Amino acid sequence: MRRRHVLRSLLALPALSLTAARAQQNWPNGNIALVVPFTPGGSTDILARLLGQKLGEALGVGVVIDSRPGAGGSIASAQVARARPDGQTLIMGHIGTLGVNPSLYKDLPYDPLTSFAHISMLARVHNVLAVYPGVPAGNVLELIDYAKKNPGKLNYGSGGNGSAAHIATAAFMVATGTELTHVPYRGTAPAVTDLLGGQIQMMMTGAPAILPHSSAGALRALGVSSEKRIPAAPEIPTIAEAGVPGFEASQWYGVLAPAGTPRPIIDRLNAEVRKALASKEIVDALQRDGAEPWAMSPEEFHDFIAREIPRWAIVVEKARIKPE
Protein backbone atom coordinates (compact mmCIF):
# COMPACT_ATOMS: atom_id res chain seq x y z
CA MET A 1 0.00 0.00 0.00
CA ARG A 2 2.78 2.40 0.93
CA ARG A 3 4.59 1.71 -2.37
CA ARG A 4 1.43 2.41 -4.36
CA HIS A 5 0.93 5.67 -2.45
CA VAL A 6 4.48 6.78 -3.16
CA LEU A 7 4.10 5.82 -6.84
CA ARG A 8 0.88 7.78 -7.18
CA SER A 9 2.55 10.79 -5.55
CA LEU A 10 5.48 10.62 -7.96
CA LEU A 11 3.19 10.29 -10.95
CA ALA A 12 1.24 13.33 -9.78
CA LEU A 13 4.31 15.56 -9.68
CA PRO A 14 4.44 16.29 -13.44
CA ALA A 15 0.73 17.15 -13.39
CA LEU A 16 1.22 19.51 -10.49
CA SER A 17 4.18 21.13 -12.22
CA LEU A 18 2.16 21.51 -15.41
CA THR A 19 -0.72 23.09 -13.48
CA ALA A 20 1.65 25.57 -11.84
CA ALA A 21 3.25 26.41 -15.16
CA ARG A 22 -0.13 27.00 -16.79
CA ALA A 23 -1.15 29.20 -13.88
CA GLN A 24 1.88 31.36 -14.45
CA GLN A 25 1.45 31.46 -18.25
CA ASN A 26 -2.22 32.48 -18.04
CA TRP A 27 -1.66 35.08 -15.35
CA PRO A 28 -2.55 37.86 -15.05
CA ASN A 29 -5.94 37.41 -16.62
CA GLY A 30 -7.17 41.00 -16.70
CA ASN A 31 -6.89 43.74 -14.11
CA ILE A 32 -5.59 42.95 -10.63
CA ALA A 33 -7.42 44.21 -7.56
CA LEU A 34 -5.15 45.53 -4.82
CA VAL A 35 -7.35 45.79 -1.75
CA VAL A 36 -6.62 48.47 0.84
CA PRO A 37 -8.39 47.65 4.13
CA PHE A 38 -8.67 51.32 5.15
CA THR A 39 -10.11 54.57 3.83
CA PRO A 40 -8.22 56.56 1.17
CA GLY A 41 -5.67 59.16 2.23
CA GLY A 42 -3.66 57.22 4.80
CA SER A 43 -0.20 55.70 4.52
CA THR A 44 -1.55 52.32 3.35
CA ASP A 45 -3.44 53.93 0.49
CA ILE A 46 -0.49 56.10 -0.54
CA LEU A 47 1.87 53.12 -0.63
CA ALA A 48 -0.68 50.97 -2.48
CA ARG A 49 -0.94 53.52 -5.28
CA LEU A 50 2.83 53.74 -5.66
CA LEU A 51 3.12 49.95 -5.81
CA GLY A 52 0.07 49.50 -8.01
CA GLN A 53 1.46 51.78 -10.69
CA LYS A 54 4.76 49.89 -10.82
CA LEU A 55 3.14 46.45 -10.82
CA GLY A 56 0.72 47.48 -13.55
CA GLU A 57 3.58 48.69 -15.75
CA ALA A 58 5.57 45.48 -15.18
CA LEU A 59 2.67 43.08 -15.70
CA GLY A 60 0.95 44.95 -18.53
CA VAL A 61 -2.43 45.18 -16.80
CA GLY A 62 -4.28 47.65 -14.66
CA VAL A 63 -3.96 47.45 -10.89
CA VAL A 64 -7.17 48.74 -9.35
CA ILE A 65 -6.95 50.12 -5.81
CA ASP A 66 -10.00 48.84 -3.93
CA SER A 67 -10.59 50.52 -0.55
CA ARG A 68 -12.65 48.42 1.87
CA PRO A 69 -12.49 49.91 5.40
CA GLY A 70 -14.01 48.48 8.54
CA ALA A 71 -13.21 46.69 11.81
CA GLY A 72 -9.55 47.65 11.86
CA GLY A 73 -9.02 46.14 8.42
CA SER A 74 -10.47 42.76 9.44
CA ILE A 75 -13.42 42.85 7.05
CA ALA A 76 -11.30 43.30 3.94
CA SER A 77 -8.66 40.85 5.17
CA ALA A 78 -11.26 38.15 5.67
CA GLN A 79 -12.78 38.81 2.24
CA VAL A 80 -9.43 38.50 0.49
CA ALA A 81 -8.57 35.37 2.48
CA ARG A 82 -11.71 33.80 0.98
CA ALA A 83 -11.07 35.08 -2.56
CA ARG A 84 -10.12 32.80 -5.42
CA PRO A 85 -6.37 32.06 -5.19
CA ASP A 86 -5.59 32.98 -8.78
CA GLY A 87 -3.33 35.99 -8.31
CA GLN A 88 -6.04 38.45 -9.42
CA THR A 89 -6.79 39.68 -5.90
CA LEU A 90 -4.09 40.99 -3.56
CA ILE A 91 -4.24 42.87 -0.28
CA MET A 92 -2.12 45.44 1.45
CA GLY A 93 -1.12 43.87 4.75
CA HIS A 94 -0.35 46.10 7.68
CA ILE A 95 0.93 46.02 11.25
CA GLY A 96 -2.67 46.33 12.45
CA THR A 97 -4.31 43.63 10.34
CA LEU A 98 -1.43 41.16 10.62
CA GLY A 99 0.37 41.95 13.88
CA VAL A 100 -2.24 43.46 16.21
CA ASN A 101 -5.67 42.12 15.27
CA PRO A 102 -4.95 38.53 16.43
CA SER A 103 -4.75 39.87 20.00
CA LEU A 104 -7.48 42.46 19.59
CA TYR A 105 -10.31 40.40 18.11
CA LYS A 106 -11.44 37.26 19.90
CA ASP A 107 -12.89 35.57 16.80
CA LEU A 108 -10.73 36.95 14.01
CA PRO A 109 -12.13 35.61 10.72
CA TYR A 110 -8.67 34.98 9.24
CA ASP A 111 -5.23 33.86 10.38
CA PRO A 112 -2.33 36.16 9.39
CA LEU A 113 -0.01 33.16 9.11
CA THR A 114 -2.17 30.57 7.34
CA SER A 115 -4.93 32.43 5.48
CA PHE A 116 -2.57 34.12 3.01
CA ALA A 117 0.27 33.47 0.63
CA HIS A 118 2.87 35.99 1.81
CA ILE A 119 4.47 37.87 -1.09
CA SER A 120 6.79 40.47 0.42
CA MET A 121 7.19 43.16 3.00
CA LEU A 122 7.00 46.52 1.25
CA ALA A 123 8.05 49.32 3.52
CA ARG A 124 8.43 50.63 7.00
CA VAL A 125 6.64 53.93 7.60
CA HIS A 126 7.76 55.81 10.66
CA ASN A 127 5.14 57.43 12.86
CA VAL A 128 5.30 61.09 13.78
CA LEU A 129 3.96 62.30 17.12
CA ALA A 130 2.26 65.63 16.45
CA VAL A 131 0.12 68.00 18.47
CA TYR A 132 -2.29 70.79 17.68
CA PRO A 133 -0.44 74.12 18.08
CA GLY A 134 -2.67 75.07 21.00
CA VAL A 135 -1.29 72.25 23.16
CA PRO A 136 1.21 73.71 25.69
CA ALA A 137 4.06 71.36 24.84
CA GLY A 138 7.09 72.16 22.72
CA ASN A 139 8.75 68.78 23.07
CA VAL A 140 8.06 65.20 24.12
CA LEU A 141 8.97 65.66 27.78
CA GLU A 142 6.71 68.70 28.08
CA LEU A 143 3.88 66.70 26.50
CA ILE A 144 4.41 63.86 28.99
CA ASP A 145 4.47 66.31 31.89
CA TYR A 146 1.27 68.01 30.72
CA ALA A 147 -0.46 64.67 30.19
CA LYS A 148 0.47 63.47 33.68
CA LYS A 149 -0.84 66.68 35.24
CA ASN A 150 -4.05 66.43 33.18
CA PRO A 151 -4.89 62.71 32.94
CA GLY A 152 -7.40 61.95 30.20
CA LYS A 153 -7.61 65.57 29.05
CA LEU A 154 -5.62 65.10 25.85
CA ASN A 155 -7.60 63.41 23.07
CA TYR A 156 -5.66 61.54 20.43
CA GLY A 157 -7.01 60.40 17.10
CA SER A 158 -6.44 57.29 15.03
CA GLY A 159 -7.77 55.59 11.94
CA GLY A 160 -9.89 53.30 14.11
CA ASN A 161 -9.75 50.86 16.98
CA GLY A 162 -6.73 48.62 16.60
CA SER A 163 -5.21 50.80 13.88
CA ALA A 164 -1.47 51.43 13.79
CA ALA A 165 -1.94 54.93 15.22
CA HIS A 166 -4.05 53.55 18.06
CA ILE A 167 -1.53 50.85 18.96
CA ALA A 168 1.50 53.16 18.62
CA THR A 169 -0.05 55.71 20.97
CA ALA A 170 -1.06 52.96 23.39
CA ALA A 171 2.57 51.83 23.40
CA PHE A 172 3.56 55.44 24.15
CA MET A 173 1.15 55.54 27.09
CA VAL A 174 2.51 52.27 28.47
CA ALA A 175 6.09 53.52 28.10
CA THR A 176 5.43 56.91 29.70
CA GLY A 177 2.77 56.14 32.29
CA THR A 178 0.38 58.68 30.81
CA GLU A 179 -3.39 58.54 30.36
CA LEU A 180 -4.72 59.80 27.04
CA THR A 181 -8.23 59.55 25.59
CA HIS A 182 -8.62 57.67 22.32
CA VAL A 183 -10.92 59.04 19.61
CA PRO A 184 -11.24 56.51 16.77
CA TYR A 185 -12.13 57.64 13.25
CA ARG A 186 -13.04 55.82 10.07
CA GLY A 187 -9.60 56.32 8.56
CA THR A 188 -6.50 58.44 9.02
CA ALA A 189 -7.55 61.35 6.82
CA PRO A 190 -10.61 62.43 8.88
CA ALA A 191 -8.58 62.11 12.07
CA VAL A 192 -5.89 64.41 10.69
CA THR A 193 -8.58 66.86 9.57
CA ASP A 194 -9.90 67.09 13.12
CA LEU A 195 -6.38 67.41 14.49
CA LEU A 196 -5.83 70.39 12.19
CA GLY A 197 -9.05 71.92 13.49
CA GLY A 198 -8.24 71.32 17.15
CA GLN A 199 -11.13 68.90 17.76
CA ILE A 200 -8.47 66.45 18.98
CA GLN A 201 -5.14 67.49 20.44
CA MET A 202 -2.58 64.93 19.32
CA MET A 203 -1.89 62.00 17.05
CA MET A 204 0.90 59.55 16.31
CA THR A 205 0.54 58.26 12.78
CA GLY A 206 2.49 57.66 9.59
CA ALA A 207 4.79 60.44 8.44
CA PRO A 208 3.07 60.87 5.03
CA ALA A 209 -0.12 62.04 6.73
CA ILE A 210 1.63 64.46 9.13
CA LEU A 211 4.75 65.95 7.55
CA PRO A 212 3.04 68.22 4.98
CA HIS A 213 1.08 69.87 7.79
CA SER A 214 3.96 70.12 10.25
CA SER A 215 6.17 71.61 7.54
CA ALA A 216 3.50 74.24 6.90
CA GLY A 217 3.26 75.06 10.60
CA ALA A 218 -0.30 73.79 10.96
CA LEU A 219 0.83 71.06 13.38
CA ARG A 220 3.75 70.76 15.79
CA ALA A 221 5.80 67.58 15.28
CA LEU A 222 7.46 66.52 18.53
CA GLY A 223 9.12 63.22 17.64
CA VAL A 224 9.39 60.25 15.29
CA SER A 225 8.89 56.69 16.44
CA SER A 226 11.87 55.20 14.60
CA GLU A 227 15.28 54.18 15.94
CA LYS A 228 16.91 57.09 14.13
CA ARG A 229 15.83 60.39 12.60
CA ILE A 230 14.23 60.23 9.19
CA PRO A 231 15.72 61.89 6.09
CA ALA A 232 12.39 63.55 5.26
CA ALA A 233 12.49 65.55 8.50
CA PRO A 234 15.93 65.36 10.12
CA GLU A 235 15.08 68.24 12.44
CA ILE A 236 12.52 66.12 14.32
CA PRO A 237 14.14 64.07 17.11
CA THR A 238 13.27 60.46 17.74
CA ILE A 239 10.93 59.91 20.66
CA ALA A 240 13.67 57.81 22.24
CA GLU A 241 16.23 60.62 22.18
CA ALA A 242 13.57 63.15 23.19
CA GLY A 243 13.03 61.48 26.53
CA VAL A 244 11.54 57.96 26.18
CA PRO A 245 14.59 55.64 25.92
CA GLY A 246 14.13 52.56 23.76
CA PHE A 247 10.79 53.62 22.30
CA GLU A 248 10.13 52.36 18.77
CA ALA A 249 6.72 51.90 17.14
CA SER A 250 6.89 52.16 13.37
CA GLN A 251 4.25 50.95 10.97
CA TRP A 252 5.01 48.29 8.39
CA TYR A 253 3.26 47.17 5.25
CA GLY A 254 3.36 44.14 3.00
CA VAL A 255 1.43 42.58 0.16
CA LEU A 256 -0.34 39.22 0.29
CA ALA A 257 -2.58 36.94 -1.76
CA PRO A 258 -5.12 34.32 -0.70
CA ALA A 259 -3.60 31.08 0.58
CA GLY A 260 -3.22 28.54 -2.21
CA THR A 261 -2.14 31.04 -4.85
CA PRO A 262 0.31 29.14 -7.09
CA ARG A 263 3.93 29.58 -6.09
CA PRO A 264 5.04 30.69 -9.58
CA ILE A 265 2.67 33.67 -9.28
CA ILE A 266 3.92 34.48 -5.79
CA ASP A 267 7.52 34.32 -6.99
CA ARG A 268 6.79 36.58 -9.96
CA LEU A 269 5.05 39.08 -7.71
CA ASN A 270 7.91 38.99 -5.24
CA ALA A 271 10.38 39.67 -8.04
CA GLU A 272 8.34 42.60 -9.36
CA VAL A 273 7.90 44.05 -5.86
CA ARG A 274 11.67 43.92 -5.35
CA LYS A 275 12.23 45.71 -8.66
CA ALA A 276 9.68 48.36 -7.75
CA LEU A 277 11.20 48.96 -4.32
CA ALA A 278 14.67 49.28 -5.87
CA SER A 279 13.54 51.91 -8.39
CA LYS A 280 14.69 55.46 -7.77
CA GLU A 281 11.15 56.72 -8.22
CA ILE A 282 9.80 54.57 -5.39
CA VAL A 283 12.81 55.08 -3.11
CA ASP A 284 12.62 58.85 -3.51
CA ALA A 285 8.86 58.90 -2.99
CA LEU A 286 9.12 56.80 0.16
CA GLN A 287 11.93 58.88 1.60
CA ARG A 288 10.02 62.09 0.95
CA ASP A 289 7.24 60.67 3.07
CA GLY A 290 9.49 59.45 5.88
CA ALA A 291 9.37 55.81 4.82
CA GLU A 292 11.91 53.26 3.65
CA PRO A 293 11.65 50.25 1.31
CA TRP A 294 11.86 46.89 3.00
CA ALA A 295 11.68 43.89 0.66
CA MET A 296 11.59 40.32 2.00
CA SER A 297 11.18 36.83 0.66
CA PRO A 298 7.77 35.20 1.26
CA GLU A 299 9.28 33.07 4.02
CA GLU A 300 10.97 36.04 5.70
CA PHE A 301 7.72 37.99 5.62
CA HIS A 302 5.81 35.08 7.18
CA ASP A 303 8.37 34.68 9.96
CA PHE A 304 8.44 38.42 10.66
CA ILE A 305 4.67 38.43 11.24
CA ALA A 306 5.03 35.44 13.56
CA ARG A 307 7.41 37.50 15.73
CA GLU A 308 5.25 40.64 15.68
CA ILE A 309 2.05 39.01 16.94
CA PRO A 310 3.32 38.28 20.49
CA ARG A 311 5.11 41.64 20.64
CA TRP A 312 1.91 43.62 20.16
CA ALA A 313 -0.13 41.23 22.28
CA ILE A 314 1.76 42.63 25.28
CA VAL A 315 0.76 46.22 24.39
CA VAL A 316 -2.88 45.24 23.82
CA GLU A 317 -2.99 43.56 27.23
CA LYS A 318 -1.19 46.28 29.20
CA ALA A 319 -3.17 49.10 27.60
CA ARG A 320 -6.44 47.13 27.93
CA ILE A 321 -7.32 47.84 24.32
CA LYS A 322 -10.72 46.68 23.15
CA PRO A 323 -11.96 46.57 19.55
CA GLU A 324 -15.07 48.60 20.36
Image (tube, helix red, strand yellow):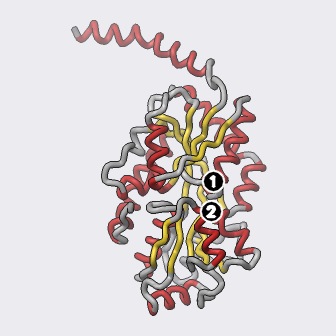
Q: Is residue 227 left or right of residue 221?
A: left
Q: Position of residue 124 (x, y in %)?
A: 59, 57
Residue at left 24%, top 11%? 2
Amino acid marked by disc 1: Pro
Residue name at image x 62 percent, y 58 percent = 42
**What whole-number distance in Å separates the C-alpha atoms at marks 1 and 2?**
7 Å
**Which sits in the foreground, 59 or 68?**
68
Q: Is residue 96 left or right of residue 92?
A: left
First of labels 1, 2 by sequence position: 1
Q: Residue at x 44, y 34 (%)?
A: 82
Q: Which residue is mark 1?
A: 40
Q: Is residue 277 toward the left or the right of residue 256 in the image?
A: right
Quadrant position of the N terminus in the picture: top left
* Circle number at residue 189: 2
CB within 8 Å, label 1 to label 2: yes
Residue 213: % across, % down: 71, 72
